[in-house]
Each structure stands twice: as structure tokens, then as C-alpha cells.
Image: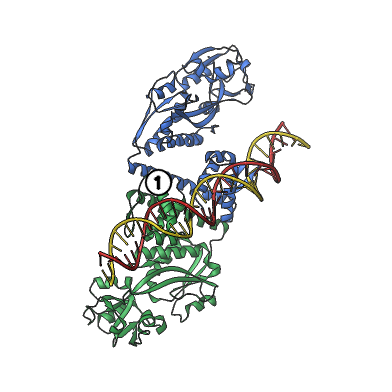
Chain colours: A green, B blue, C red, D yellow
Amino acid sequence: MIELRHLRSLAAIADTGKLVHAASQVHLTQSALSHQMRALEEHYGAALFQRTGAGLRFTPAGQRLLQLARETLVAVADAERDLLRLKGDAGGDLRIALECHTCFDWLMPVMDAFRGRWPEVEVDLLAGFHSDPLALLQSGKAELVIGSQKPRGRDYVALPLFRFEILAVLPVEHRLRAKRRIEAADLKGETLITYPVPEERIDLIRQVLKPAGIKLTRRTAELTVAILQLVASRRGIAALPNWGVRNYVDLDYVIARRIGAKGLWSDLHAVVPRALAGRPYVTEFVDIIRSKCAAGLDGIELL
Amino acid sequence: MIELRHLRSLAAIADTGKLVHAASQVHLTQSALSHQMRALEEHYGAALFQRTGAGLRFTPAGQRLLQLARETLVAVADAERDLLRLKGDAGGDLRIALECHTCFDWLMPVMDAFRGRWPEVEVDLLAGFHSDPLALLQSGKAELVIGSQKPRGRDYVALPLFRFEILAVLPVEHRLRAKRRIEAADLKGETLITYPVPEERIDLIRQVLKPAGIKLTRRTAELTVAILQLVASRRGIAALPNWGVRNYVDLDYVIARRIGAKGLWSDLHAVVPRALAGRPYVTEFVDIIRSKCAAGLDGIELL
DNA sequence: AGATTACCTTGAATTAAATTCATATCAGGA
DNA sequence: TCCTGATATGAATTTAATTCAAGGTAATCT
């Protein structure tokens, strides 16, 4: 007999395409999922997946059950929200601070979706630049920080969001355009255009250039479009998230190249005080980020 | 973590109002349901029921979960139907024979609802009177018989529907109008108006009059309204299901009285060949009867 | 071609959880 | 006050899900 557990697994498999990843998403082993799905298939006497070398592809029967899963899981979430509301536990503050400039790109639709579902929660985005965003949690000025820093103590929890690749962005006619991969040494002598934040907060510098002992001239701009404009007009190069440059690359405005052999990746987390980590609205805020970003952002990988 | 199992139980509790009955509906013990519900209440930190001496009453939180259960369970049923359809297993014949005249009263809406959900199943109602409806199953002329007879062999299964009370129907000014309960002896000398079926098929005769050694003059009519007309115009008395006479009683057209101390009850079953009993469309046909009748018919009791 | 990697599957062992059993408890009606 | 008809509870049991430890397979790299 089918249970919500199966539907949760099904949804996770659809999200990730792979049993291993789905398993960690639902806090099970990959084997458990395999057993679960096989049991479902036996129960209904129909294959739900086509097993390919690189994961699972849903069959029509699988898709129908997936549709059920999607419907059902939101119905359950809605009901649970209403139960909290009946208890009067659905309210709270959620002041958000961003460690990364680029998070602005996807945060607004997330906040909108969230506000629709948790009208009693006061969501706010802390404006301006913060040298030490995690400190805002300690001082009680924010409840949630999005960034790649992990919290020090055990009073705070990092809820994994996703990882994205940071690409080197070059003008179209750049001397390095023929290389598929850009190495640290290649960049010697370039000007690096970044957001106006300290060096330690720039992944390319911290993880690639500094270890290689390379120091570039730096120039800053506030907005992503401004950075891209500067790159396009040959004032320097930049390192930006995959999804942020995709459109401009497609328009041949700039070119983007992988950095190093495996690429330069950044892991994003939502850091919250441990006391808040279990609150349903926090959990759901994180879920919304994950699902909206997985759906809307190219080439990211859920953590 | 909530599971469909909980929702199924919740729905059963709502249907029956009592843990014991709900338990048998979902094939569990009363204790299991009690544990289940307590676990749910603990999980959500909210009471789902108000425990009264006579069963459970849903609190608002309980009602919200019940609503979820209702939505979700139909979504699941829909999906499972579609899975069968994808397998091409959703078709079949369902020719229905009625042992009881009064079943016509509720069968049509049931058939309509069923046709909507299982368009691939050929549903038909066998017309006319059948002296031995169960024989129709054996001869392959019908797949399902509705009535109170239980099948003899183990090639056939009786799926329980509901029990209803048969009331004595009397003209408004009848000499027995002052009695709350009608006993067999009271009826001596009356004319009994029935459908045109053999004596053994009339519960009042088989279960009440014959044991008391009383034989009444009999007169027959095809239609329920015709019987009621005859009763109203003092041509005799009748014995009809609770729900069938309610409206006429409310209009003071006739009066209805309980027969014997505990009333005269009839248990309805759907009898099908064992091979068909597990088919999902058969199960659902029975479910539709049960739920539509429970909702639309006064004073019946699900079996 | 051979090794490596990144998947999924399988069966047995284990662990966890749900269910039953056997009472206990409780409320209302005669 | 004592039935009757309900639900609650705790321990024992049973059932079912999960993990563990290998095994298999196909694609990719060298």
C-alpha cells in the first residue's frame, strides 16, 4: 500500500535524478530507496523508471505517480501550515542578510513565494553591505544569513542550499578565448572586476589566485550588469556565477570559461540560530530556495 | 511524520464516528487506531479529537487534517486508476442484478458516479425480476448481485454494504397509530402490500410473521409510490425501508413504526465471483455505494 | 584494453516502528 | 451502583522498513 514516504522519495528522485542524491535528501540510504521503488513497482505491476547508466528516467506510470506526489505533498504542507496557524505558532521574524551579492538574483521570487505561504512571518532583507554577516546573527539583527561561510559554534546551524559554478568571464576577443579551462597562471597581468567587498570574500582570489601567489589589479562595480559591461569593453575580467552570465554568453556579449580542471564551485548555506532551525517556516524558506533555484538557475547542484 | 495510513484512519473515524468501527474498516484493531491518533496528536502538539463517552468528535485541527485526508485519498485513488489504465487493466464488465426492489432508489446515482470514474468498465443493470439472482452469477449472466442473501460456496464473496431498517407503514388514522412498536400479533387481519416477489423474499414475512404463525392477505404493486398510495388509501399496510418512507411520513401522507423491540433490519451485500472481488473497479463500486448511501440515506448503518 | 568511476540492485541482517493483546479507565444510562 | 459501550495504555509481538555489504553494469578516462 502506497504511503507518503514513497511519494516523498519519488519527488526527491525527480528533483535529483539520482538515487544517491535523492536518498540524502530524504535522509535514507540509496539502498533503501532502491528497495522502496522496487516495492512500488511490484505493487502496481508496472515499471516506474527506466534505469539508465546515469540515473533514473521516469516512465509514464512513474510520471503519473510523481504528479500525485507533487499534488499531495503540497496539500500536506498546506495542511500542516494551517495546523500551526490554529495553534497560533505560525508567526515570527525572518530578517535575512546576504553574504553574496549574487544571491539577490534569485532571492526576490523566493521571498514572494514565501510571503504568500507564511503571511504571519515578517520577512525582511537587510540592506547594505555587511563585513561580517554571521555577526548579525549573534547580535540579533538577523535571523538568517545566506552565504558560503559555515558558522563557528554549535549555536548556529548551516542548512545546505546548493552549489554553483563560478566562471571566468572574458571579453569576446580575449587572448585566452581559445582555452577551455583557465588556470590561475593564465590570469597574470589581468585586471579583476569584482563587487566592492574585501578580498577574502572573493572566491577566485581566496581559492585560486592567492594559493598560486598571484595578485591582480582590482576594480569594483556594484551591479552585475556593470561588471559585465566593464568586461565586455575590455577593462578587465570577472568571475561570476554560471547562471548570472549565461544570457550574456548566449548573446555573444562576453565569453565564460571554467576555472581549473574541476571548476571553481561555491557552496551556499542558510545559517540560522539553532533554536530556529526546526521552525517549519524556516525549513520551508530553505525548501523554497532550493526548489526555486533548482528550477530556475542553470547548472546548479542541490546540496 | 504523517503517512497516508493516518489519513486513511482519520477518514474512517470520520465516517463511523467510533474507533472500533473505523478500526474494522481499515483492518486494524481499536487499539492501533488509538495509538495512531495519539501519535499524530503528539506530533502536531494539538488535540485532533474531543473524546466523548460516545465516540470522537473532531476538533478544528482534526477537521483540517480530515480535509487533507479527503483530498489526498481521492487524489491517490485517481492516480491508481490511471496507473491501471496505463497498463490497460481498467476495463471489464459489470452486470448488476438486484435482489431487492428498493435498491433502485439509490443505485442510479451510484452508477453515474462509477461510470464517470471507470469509463472503460461496461456497467449494466439487469432488468426484470429474477427468482434466484445468485444463479445469474453462476450462469455468467451477471457479475454482481446486490441483496441480503449470502452466497453458498466459496467461489463467491459477499462484500458488505450496509444495513437498513424496515418500518411498518400504516395509513395515518390506522388503529395501531398509537403504538411506538408494532409486534407480529398486532398485524393479524391486515392486508400486506408488497412488491410482486415470492414470500420468502419479503423480510417481514420470513422473519416476523411466519415465525409467529401469522399469515396475511397479500396484494402487490410494482412501484414504491404505488405501494404508498395503496397504504395511504387504507387498502393495507406495507413494510418499507426507512429512507424510502421518510419523505412521505414528513408530509403526513402515511405513518411509519418500528417493527418489534429492536426493529427489523436487513443487511445488504454485493456478491461477486471470488475472481472479481479484488479488481479495483469492483472495490471502488462497493466503496461508492457505501459512501453515497451513508451520505444520502437516512438511518442506515455501514457494515 | 584495462582501470576507474558513478551509478543501481540484491539478499541477509538489523533496527525501528506499528500493531496486537490484555487490561485499565472512563462516562452515561438503567 | 452496576452494566454497557466507549477509548487509553503498556508491554509483548509482529511486521515492515532500513541498512550493510557485496555484486553488477555501463560509461569514461588513460
Tell which of B127 and B97 is nearer to you. B97
Q: Does residue B57 appear anywhere in the picture?
A: no
Tell which of B202 and B148 is nearer to you. B148
* Chain that bears disc 1: A
Residue at 23 percent across and 81 percent down: it is: A174
How many numbered discs? 1
Question: What is the x, y in percent for residue D4?
Answer: 67, 34
For the residue labelled by badge 1, is the local secondary structure a helix, a strand or a loop? helix
Taking B94 as reference, is A76 above or below it?
below
Residue at 43 percent across and 29 percent down: it is: B272
Q: Does residue A66 appear anywhere in the picture?
A: yes
Question: What is the x, y in percent for residue D14?
Answer: 55, 44
Question: What is the x, y in percent for residue B300?
Answer: 54, 32
Amino acid type, residue under disc 1 in the picture: Glu
- Asked which quadrant contains residue A275, the reply is bottom right
Residue at 47 percent across and 22 percent down: it is: B225
Residue under numbered circle 1: A42
Question: What is the x, y in percent for residue B43?
Answer: 56, 55
Tell which of C5 and B2 is nearer to you. C5
Tell which of B285 and A184 is nearer to you. A184
Q: Residues within 10 Å of mark 1 (few under 14, many from 20)?
A: few
